[in-house]
Image (spheres, rainbow, N blue to C red):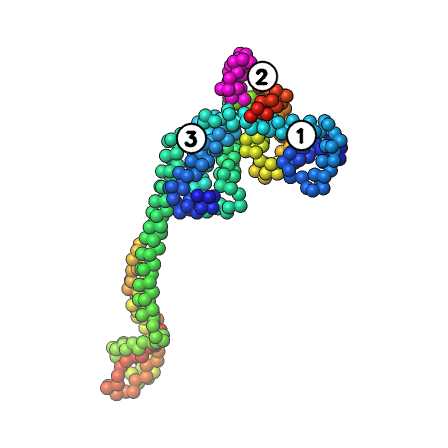
Amino acid sequence: MNDEELALALKDQDSAAVRELLDSYGDRLLRSAFLLCGNETEAQDLVQETFLEAIRSVHRFQGRSSIYTWLHAILLNLTRQHRRAQKRIVYDDELVGREVADETPDQLDAQTASSALQAAFRKLSEAHRDVIVLRYYENLKIHEIADRLGLSEGTVKSRLHYALEQLQKFLPGELNLFGPGDTEEIQKQ
Amino acid sequence: MNCRRFHDELFEYVDGTLSADELTAAEKHLAECEACRQAVEKERRLASALSSRLRQSTQSLTLRPEIRRNIVTASRKRGSALIDLWKYWVRMAVIPGAALLIAGVLLAGHFSGTRRHETVSVPVVPLVSEVASAAGNSPQAPVLVQMSYRLPTRQFHQEGNLVVDTLVDETVDADGVFQASGKETISPKLEMKTPL
């Protein structure tokens, strides 16, 4: 089913359409939710809420964007509401940071590198995390991020600059994404 | 375009969202500025590396089976909830609707035709005699008669799903002049016109 057919099937309460929606976008949304909120359990709950809200409000989907874009917009709104409700999410940054700092470059396998990136990511403010996820995980353009967050394009660019500076500071040197080492890695990929 | 202006538009340049004029100016500046060319390359390299690393760091995450089940079950419940809601509204709308229709038919029947006056004949001989004797007049003299009577009236109201027709009394005051002819055979009736 394409997006239009999927939306029509959802409006008809078609369970097969719900399963297809989950197969197509469930994991992708979960990963984005995890990056946004920093906690897997919360991410799972947020994705569940996102799908339920989407099913409830599918009559409002007008096909101006892709279904994934629409779903992600719901997820982002729910995440921000959840943060406001929680006031503050506490991470055990010291513990994660110490685990990473104790590793030598040779020991930095893929899993450790992922943990290090996640740890650095969690140290970012929510505002900085949002712009980085939307820019570098969801691959949105500046004006799309501005629309999604209700900010001016200038504010988005400013936040991106500061967010990248912070991320560079929090990442261990071996994982520096901003140096020439990564160029070779990307070219190999 | 200078370096500062180019850096302001770096993201839009990489996104390919600059206007034709802005793009021309940016390309012209890039042809002359090594630092800005490196900045573009750095942004593209960073975007690729960060995107790749973010994907790697989350690729093991999958939606839990119970979450999937919850969503599918909730979507089914919503379907049945909609049916239940429809049944509820049918029940709530059709039954009173039918009752009102019946009441409407009854009322239409009740009030069909032109409003008319009903003639009420009341035997007044004892009354007139009493009035006349009390007044000390002969029965032939005109006598002002005042009287009140209770008129049965139907009222409709709803009780739950029923329309209830209640018979109530309405008090009507009437008066008239009685002019007896002096003959005993006179029909001692007072005619009153009372709107129903």
Q: Is residue A160 above or below residue B108?
A: above
The N terminus of chain A sits in image quarter: top left
Q: Residues within 10 Å of mark 2 (few under 14, many from 20)?
A: few
Label 1: element kind = helix
Q: Position of residue B39 (x, y in %)?
A: 68, 28
Q: Position of residue B117 (x, y in %)?
A: 34, 76
Which residue is outermost to the front? Answer: A188
Left or right: B140 as drawn, with respect to A8: left
Residue located 35% across and 50% down the image? B86
Residue B40: which numbered mark, if any?
1
Q: Position of residue B83 (x, y in %)?
A: 34, 48
For the record, the magenta segment spans A91-117
Residue located 60% across and 29% down the image? B47
The residue identified by callout 2 is: A174
Viewer-proximal residue among B75 and A80: B75
Label 2: element kind = helix
Viewer-proximal residue among A51 and B170: A51
Let me know if residue A44 appears in the view. yes
